[in-house]
Amino acid sequence: MGHHPSTYPDGKKHCGVCNRKRDLMFFGVTGKKTWTLRSNCFECEKKYQTAAEHTWQGWAKRRLSSCRGRAKRKGIPCTITQRDVLELLPKDLKCPVLGIKMQRGNRKDHSKSPSLDEVVPGKGYVPGNVVVVSNKANTWKSSMAPADIKKLWKFYRKFDV
């Protein structure tokens, strides 16, 4: 836990990771009511976050956190766990809808990123109502009503593509 900047009379603080004594401007602020400094410098925090982003555990943790926030805003349940999320991820990493290889997205293209989807919107992020599909498939589903998806399929199936 960090301390208020006034507790550092020389304007410097030791980073909890690299142990370098750095100016206070190298530390983020935490706390909504109390103005305290983070324990680690920006550089070490960034290294930690970058490393976490490149693991499937890190991906699952972030997705679950996002789902919990959405569920809270919508007033729906979110009872799945990080383990549930990892178990939903297809072993071959192929989107079950589009058959494309899923990968954690980069800043430019998220279409192949795995995405958590509520099968029945509004039912919540609960076991049996959540699947992992590509962001592309999830975006299509969320932007089209089931009747529109049927119309699209009905139109294109006659072309035998």
Image (spheres, rainbow, N blue to C red):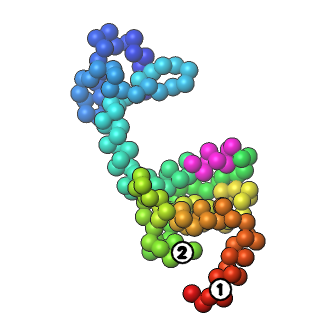
Q: Is residue 68 above or below residue 19?
A: below
Q: Is residue 68 magenta?
A: yes
Q: For mark 2, give the secondary structure.
A: loop
Q: Is residue 114 above or below residue 13?
A: below
Residue toward you, 18 or 144: 144
Q: For mark 1, give the secondary structure.
A: helix
Q: Residue at x 65, y 65 (%)?
A: 141
* Mark 2: amino acid: Leu
Q: Is residue 127 above or below residue 5?
A: below
Question: Which quarter of the rendered picture does the C terminus lie within?
Answer: bottom right
Q: Is residue 150 magenta?
A: no
Q: Residue furthest left?
A: 20
The x and y percentages for residue 23 are 29, 20
Asked which quadrant contains residue 125, the reply is bottom right
The x and y percentages for residue 76 are 72, 50
The x and y percentages for residue 85 are 54, 60
Q: Residue at x 30, y 35 (%)?
A: 43
Label at residue 98: 2
Q: Main secondary structure of the magenta part?
A: helix
**Label total for image:** 2
Query: Which residue in the protein does label 1 denote?
Result: 157
Asked which quadrant contains residue 44, the reply is top left
Mark 2 is surrounded, within 10 Å at the Cα level, by few (under 14), some (14 to 19) or many (20 or more) other residues, namely few
The x and y percentages for residue 108 are 42, 55
Looking at the rendering, the stretch of residues picked out in magenta corresponds to 66-73
On the rendered structure, is 80 left or right of 42?
Answer: right
On the rendered structure, is 64 left or right of 53?
Answer: right
Q: Nearer the viewer, mark 1 or mark 2?
A: 1
